[in-house]
Image: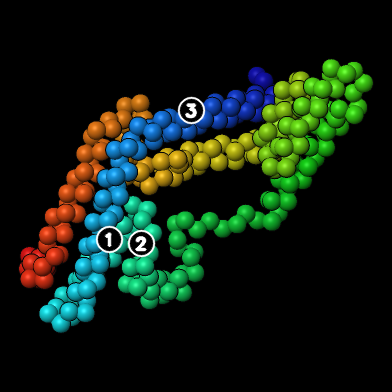
Amino acid sequence: MLPTIRLRKLEFDKKLKQIEKDELRLKALEQELQLLQSRVATESIPLVEEFCDLRFENLSRLKQYLSDSYFKKKEKRQIVHLMVELAYGLQTAGDPRAEAFLDELIPEENSEAEDSNNGFDNPKFKPAPPVEKLAEGKLEIKSLFRELAKAFHPDRELIEHLKDEKTSLMKKITAAYENQDLYGLLKIEKEHMGPREFSEDKIELYIKHINDRLKELKSFEGRLKKYGPLATIYKFIYSRKVTIQEYNIKTEISKIENEVQKEKELQQILWDSITLKNFFKS
């Protein structure tokens, strides 16, 4: 049976390899997204713009009805609710014109919500890491940087061709340190300092930081898929049920076309006060 420290060292090496695979996969994903963007941009951008313009016109029309005495208070409340729903849809499409409607329609609701929970109930809220943990990570990065700099600083090398190699390596070490990239320093240490014996505490600390890095990569992949180079277009057409390679562009474009058609149909309802009143009764 292998000693505990050796098992942890094997786990440490395995996790380093996992990070390398994840980073390569994410790089490939970014390239796929760029290719997808170039394929769909010419077809989807005009549709998204048409949708946004129609939605803006519908919101502007509804706003006029708020000052129309033809509508009763109950109906005006329905108009406001419909406007909020439409404005949120416009905001999701990435149109900045939505903000003006939302600010005008729900300023009190927003301020009350902020006062009631101070943002702590917001699912996007993430408390800052404890100062102690931040300090621990910075100390470890600084310690490892000094160790690597001492081993690979070109001024300590007398052989010219090795000095050039160490100059290049030192640039990588310095860049990793400036970016507070513990994983990058660990990778350099593993690749250039050969097999080394680590204390159990050191391995535990490294594995902890590597696990944090793996979580960051997973989180980054999620953000990339949702907010990557496709931006608002990607929000409209990306489906998590299939991979990029299996993506059916025509099907997804038709979905946007359907949204445009629905907006046109809604416009027909909104453009006449009697029709809108009947719409609320139905």
Numbered label attached to residue 207? none
Q: Earlier in the sequence, mark 3 or mark 1?
A: 3
Crowding at mark 2 (Cα within 10 Å: few <14, some 14-19, many 20+): some
> Which residue has dot 2 on it?
97
Q: Residue at image x 50%, y 42%?
A: 219
Q: Residue at image x 48%, y 65%?
A: 119
Q: Is residue 7 visible?
A: no
Does 138 sit left or right of 259 as displayed? right
Q: Amino acid at mark 1?
A: Phe
Residue 265 pos. (x, y %): 13, 55
> Which residue has dot 3 on it?
28
Question: Image quadrant of residue 111?
Answer: bottom left
> Which residue has dot 1 on it?
56
Does 190 sit left or right of 43 as displayed? right
Residue 96 pos. (x, y %): 39, 59
Helix, strand or loop under label 1: helix
Does 259 sit left or right of 16 as displayed? left
Q: Is residue 179 above or below residue 191?
A: below
Labels 2 & 1 near each other (Cβ < 8 A): yes
Q: CA distance from mark 3 to mark 2?
A: 35 Å
Q: Earlier in the sequence, mark 3 or mark 2?
A: 3
Helix, strand or loop under label 3: helix
Q: CA distance from mark 2 to mark 1?
A: 8 Å
Query: Which scheme is used to colour this image of the protein?
Result: rainbow
Labels 3 & 1 near each other (Cβ < 8 A): no
Say which of marks 3 and 1 sits in front.
1
Q: CA distance from mark 3 to mark 1?
A: 37 Å
**Observer-nearest of 205 and 162:** 162
Q: Amino acid at mark 3?
A: Ala
